[in-house]
Amino acid sequence: FPVSAATLPGGNLNVQERSEMSFNTDLLARVKSKLSSVVDFNGFVGLNYNNRLYENIGATVSNFILPDAPFNLQNSAGASRTPFNSNFVVRTTAGYVQLGFTAFDALILNLTGRAEHPSTVSKTFYFPSASLAWHFSKLKSLPWIHPLPFGMTGGSLGDVGEKPGPYLNKP
């Protein structure tokens, strides 16, 4: 705010520098196999590493000493300066698996699971899920289905969660 502004008559300046960095990588292995003449298998396992960094450094000043001087941090008394510095680091490691089975090219079962360990707590979180689908238009033995070009029904059940927030470090 400039000097003589109604809300801050002595002026106000906020200078800050923010930086963010995120690194994410996955390692996957996949397998596909025919278990029998009517059952196919498709599965994969994976590992994940995620690292997020955030930093916010700066200062706020009010009541400038010289109202016509350029706005900078030195143009204020030390008592009117409010420095701030916050940062956080969150690292997450996880392993996950998916097992998929298809029977008669029409019945599909998927089982998945993820085990996740964030750096902010000393606990591992598990997220299982299952889904089942029936592609009924592929069954030629049901005559009433033939007029439909595509028909499928299914459902799923899973456990979801939210990662805990990072620790904030303020001096």
Image: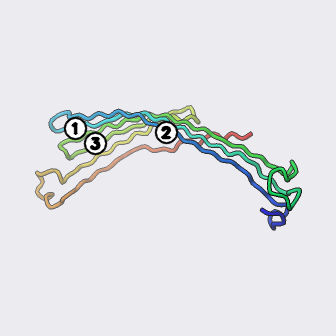
Question: Vertically, is 115 above or below 155?
Answer: above
For label 3, the residue is 109
Give the side of residue 145 with respect to residue 84, left or right: left
What percent of the width, then of the height, locates residue 159? 43, 43
User: In this rendering, which labeled residue sits more in front, label 2 or label 3?
Assistant: 2
For label 1, the residue is 40
What percent of the width, then of the height, locates residue 66? 88, 58
- The type of residue carrying mark 1 is Asp
Q: Earlier in the sequence, mark 3 or mark 1?
A: 1
Quarter of the view holding residue 2: bottom right
Give the side of residue 28 with respect to residue 123, left or right: left
**Label 3 CA crowd tier, 10 Å (few <14, some 14–19, many 20+):** some
- The type of residue carrying mark 3 is Leu
- The type of residue carrying mark 2 is Asn
**Label 2 CA crowd tier, 10 Å (few <14, some 14–19, many 20+):** few
Give the side of residue 65 with respect to residue 103, left or right: right
Of the 4 image quadrants, the one containing the N terminus is: bottom right
Q: Give me the residue at 34% from left, 37% from top.
A: 98
Dot 3: what SS?
strand
Dot 1: what SS?
strand
What percent of the width, then of the height, locates residue 40? 22, 38
- Which numbered circle lies on residue 24? 2
Dot 2: what SS?
strand
Quarter of the view holding residue 112: top left
